[in-house]
Image (spheres, grey):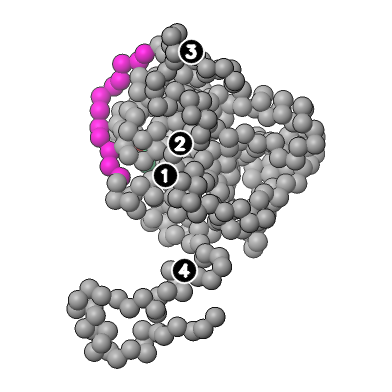
Amino acid sequence: MNDLGRIEDLPAEYVAALTERNLVPLWPSLRGVMPANTPRPRTVATHWPYQGLRPLLMEAGRLTPIEKAERRVLVLANPGHGLEKMQASSAMYLGIQLLMPGEWAPAHRHTPNAVRMIIEGEGAFTTVEGEKCPMSRGDLILTPTGLWHEHGHDGTDPVTWLDVLDLPLVYYLEASYHVNGSAQPVSPERGDELHAVGGILPTPFFQRSEKAYPVLRYPWASVRAQLLHMAHSHPYQESIQVTYINPNTGQDALNILGFYALMLKPGQRLTLPTRSTAVVFHLIEGGVQVSQPGHECRLDEADTSCAPGYVQVTLTNLRQDQPSFVFMADESPLQKKLGIYEVRS
Ligand code: 1HN
């Protein structure tokens, strides 16, 4: 690979003449924007242990009333991007949100897509476009782009969840904004009930949903049971994983980010394919070692970590007698649409 000319190699008057006309020579920066063979992600492997952040989140509950926060969230920021950027990877934002009993996080809608993975507490709910979605540990709730959503809490203990948004990408596209609304009337229709059984769809003359996002809530009890069935019926299948999809299209549940649940059998060590997308790991149940070049971490329940794209990640179930369950998010729907998705192993 030949060395390209540097900016210092050019006469200062020439560079000044370019600058004055809003012009830049490409060659000094060409290798930077397009390195040889593999990108150099800013995203660095990062681990956010839940037990370390939980007391600080509860303190936020005491320090800042919900009215002053709208959404009371501690953002899981990737130091490789700079904490102030509030991004976990190039396209993914992560935060842990707290709602105290009786609190209400008012209705709004926005261009970024969001999902919530419920961590702890009972009695809270998210209402999305009039559909009231109960929140229980491990449930995945979608708030796709443009849909009204608000959170309420009728229970007695704090409720927390992991928010995953494509905010960094939508912000980068200069397309991020929100609209405030008022409390939504709740309709009795529940997409998760209409689509409770895989392989069948409500038929059009009956009540086939014309909604773009017919399922907004994926109950953990069903996903967990499905993973256990898969492990039982396919004992030689190495990776026991499901993708959260939109049942009307069979495609990913949201347009930009992908969501998955993975079961690791007792003691299982699983090397994931090396792919072009960053990945977020969040432990729903068990104990898992996450190994990647130069970084090891142990995920305990409700811990979150991330890996940049183009690195090999190995997950090891630290429990010898029980499965562990990992929720994952990545940028593959976006990368596939753009034609830049790669698997390298
Ligand atoms: C948002 O609307 C929520 O609705 C959570 O709970 C986190 C982070 C950035 C922008 C909007 C929510 C968010 C957010």
Q: Nearer the viewer, mark 2 or mark 1?
A: 2
Circle 4 sits on which residue? Answer: 34
Circle 2 sits on which residue? Answer: 254
The answer to which of marks 3 and 2 sits earlier in the sequence is 3
Vertical comparison of 228 with 305: above or below: above
Label 2 crowd (10 A; few <14 / some 14-19 / many >=20): many
Query: Residue shown at 25%/32% (left/top)?
Result: 180
Label 3 crowd (10 A; few <14 / some 14-19 / many >=20): few
Vertical comparison of 141 with 174: above or below: above
Q: What residue type is disc 3 on?
A: Thr
Extreme residue toward the top, this view: 206
- Read off the magenta span: 176-187
Is the C-beta of the residue carrying label 4 under 8 Å from the nearest atom of ligand 1? Answer: no
Q: Position of residue 35 (x, y in %)?
A: 50, 70
The answer to which of 148 and 51 lies nearer the viewer is 148
Q: What residue type is disc 1 on?
A: Asp
- Element on which disc 4 rests: loop
Residue 64 lies left or right of residue 260; in this view the side is left
The answer to which of marks 1 and 3 sits earlier in the sequence is 1
What number is the disc on residue 166?
A: 1
Using the rendered view, name the quadrant where residue 227 is placed: top right
Instruction: Give the CA distance from mark 2 to mark 4.
Output: 29 Å
- Element on which disc 3 rests: loop
Main secondary-structure element of the magenta-colored stretch: loop
What number is the disc on residue 203?
A: 3
Q: Nearer the viewer, mark 1 or mark 3?
A: 3
Residue 191 in view here? yes
Label 1 crowd (10 A; few <14 / some 14-19 / many >=20): many
Asked whether the beta carbons under mark 2 and mark 1 sit within 8 Å of each other, the answer is yes
Does residue 193 show up magenta in the picture?
A: no
The answer to which of 78 and 33 lies nearer the viewer is 33
